[in-house]
Image (cartoon, rainbow, N blue to C red):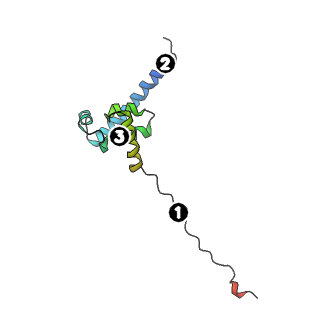
């Protein structure tokens, strides 16, 4: 069997899918959902969006695949919902502020000779 560029791409896609299914199964278990719940819940359900955000952040899977797997609707709508979700729910940590420096003069300006 010869392996060309197309065959490697198919193999890579299958490998990614086999790695990502445990992510989704783990999240469904954490939420207490089954596969039927994915179809029964709304496309913009916060649980679905949380799962999608995790999969998107930790993998290289496309929005199109994530939208189809989690039944979020079209990839265009899923991209917009996911972008909005990630901006509102995954805020970067607050930067640490430096303590304000208080300058104390080494020499009293009024005590000069």
Residue occupying the far top of the picture:
1
From what the image shows, is residue 112 above or below residue 85? below
Q: Quadrant of residue 57?
A: top left
Find disc 2 in the rendering and name its residue.
Answer: 6
Q: Is residue 37 left or right of residue 23?
A: left
Label 1 vs label 3: CA separation?
33 Å
Residue occupying the far right of the picture:
113
Label 2 vs label 1: CA separation?
52 Å
Residue drawn at x 26%, y 33% is: 35
Q: Is residue 44 left or right of residue 18?
A: left
Question: Counting other residues with Cα less than 10 Å from the Cα at mark 3, is it few (<14), some (14-19), or many (20 or more)?
Answer: some
**Foreground pick, 112 / 1:** 112
Find disc 1 in the rendering and name its residue.
Answer: 97
Find disc 3 in the rendering and name its residue.
Answer: 51
Residue 36: percent from the left, percent from the top? 23, 33
Question: Counting other residues with Cα less than 10 Å from the Cα at mark 1, is it few (<14), some (14-19), or many (20 or more)?
Answer: few
Residue 43: percent from the left, percent from the top? 29, 38
Residue 50: percent from the left, percent from the top? 35, 43
Question: Counting other residues with Cα less than 10 Å from the Cα at mark 2, is it few (<14), some (14-19), or many (20 or more)?
Answer: few
Quarter containing the C terminus: bottom right
């Amino acid at each position: 069997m010869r392996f060309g560029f197309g065959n490697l791409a198919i193999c890579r896609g299958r490998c990614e899918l086999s790695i990502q299914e445990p992510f989704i199964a783990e999240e469904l278990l954490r939420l207490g959902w089954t596969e039927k719940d994915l179809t029964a819940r709304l496309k913009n359900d916060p649980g679905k969006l949380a799962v999608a955000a995790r999969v998107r952040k930790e993998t290289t899977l496309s929005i199109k695949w994530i939208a189809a797997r989690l039944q979020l609707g079209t990839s265009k709508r899923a991209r917009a919902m996911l972008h909005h979700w990630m901006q509102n729910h995954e805020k970067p940590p607050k930067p640490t502020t430096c303590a304000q420096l208080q300058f104390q003069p080494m020499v009293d300006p009024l005590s000069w000779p």
